[in-house]
Image: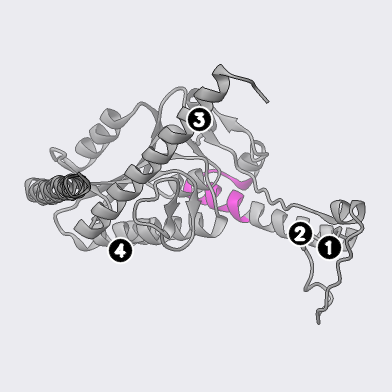
Amino acid sequence: MKARNILLIIFIIFLVGFLLLGWGIKALFKGAVQGEITEGANVALISINGPIVVGDHESAFSSDYVTSTEIITFIEDAEKNDNIKAVIFEINSPGGSAVASDEIGQAIKELRETTNKTTVSWIREVGASGAYWVASNTDYIVANKMSMTGSIGVIASYLEFSGLLDKYNITYESLSAGKYKEMGSPFKELSEEERDIFIEELKQIHQYFIEEVANNRKLTKKQVEEFADGRVFLGEKAKTLGLIDEIGGKKEALKYIETKLNITAEIVEYKESVSFLQLLTKLMSEQGFSMGKGLGTALTETNEKGVMT
């Protein structure tokens, strides 16, 4: 009886592994076919979806944020491809790192200056703060009438545990060389001098932001300063202020490109390629999570039917 159970388990494992392998190979070849179909495309679509950060993804499957390195790579690929005549940036992001936003913005600016390729930002639900910094570098900005744009401001924050340490009579002792080396440590209160230093730095970055928007959108610095207080604006108001060019979506973005360049737009989406090994890793991790979630849900439901604590 035990031998039969062992054989059954082995068979199930083999069957699941075979199905995963077949599904992965199918997905792999499907991606290759899609790539061949879009060879004649002349408009690149690059998505900026989620908070913007510097560096690379820790995981190829993390979709919670977008990295400047990844987006810049796509921009450079579009720049080198002679078939690509325009680039649409599909934006749905609340912003993020000032450095990462500026890196992407500079890459777009370089693309415009070194080639004749047209750049368009298509703002979906939100294109605010650093994401708007990015969008302002393109030739044309389209947004929905309910899209949230703007938020020209800078924020920084940190946690402070000094009160908690005092409450539990925990002593924090720091050894450092340099008057401001410990500035911003969560284990001590900021001095007024340190606070002033941080605020001054934020004001400087804010000025960079204002100047960038003014230059990119052909507005005066004074005009931008009037609404550069961190507020977000819906599409119609953003258009009135000169933050965007047109109310619309993908259709309007493509129409602008076709009219300006006198072409029929054919889109190719630029996205990170996924290896077969990464695909299997993702599948296994997702299945493991689902199984754990199912167990937790079952236990919770059992508890809800009994005594609640």
**Which residue is the site of mark 4?**
114
Q: Are marks 2 and 1 in contact (CB under 8 Å)?
A: yes
Of the residues shown, which amino acid type is indicated by label 4?
Thr
**Which residue is the site of mark 1?**
194
Of the residues tagged 3 and 2, which is closer to the observer? 3
* Quadrant housing the N terminus: top left
Q: CA distance from mark 1 to mark 4?
A: 43 Å
Any part of residue 41 in sight: no
Highlighted range, magenta:
208-221
* Quadrant housing the C terminus: top right
* Residue 15 drawn in magenta: no
Q: CA distance from mark 1 to mark 3?
A: 50 Å
Which of the numbered marks, if any, corresponds to residue 198? 2
Mark 4: few/some/many CA within 10 Å (<14, 14-19, 20+): few
Of the residues shown, which amino acid type is indicated by label 1?
Glu
Q: CA distance from mark 2 to mark 4?
A: 37 Å
Q: Are marks 1 and 4 in contact (CB under 8 Å)?
A: no
Secondary structure under tag 1 reads helix
Any part of residue 191 in sight: yes
- Left or right relative to 85: residue 121: right
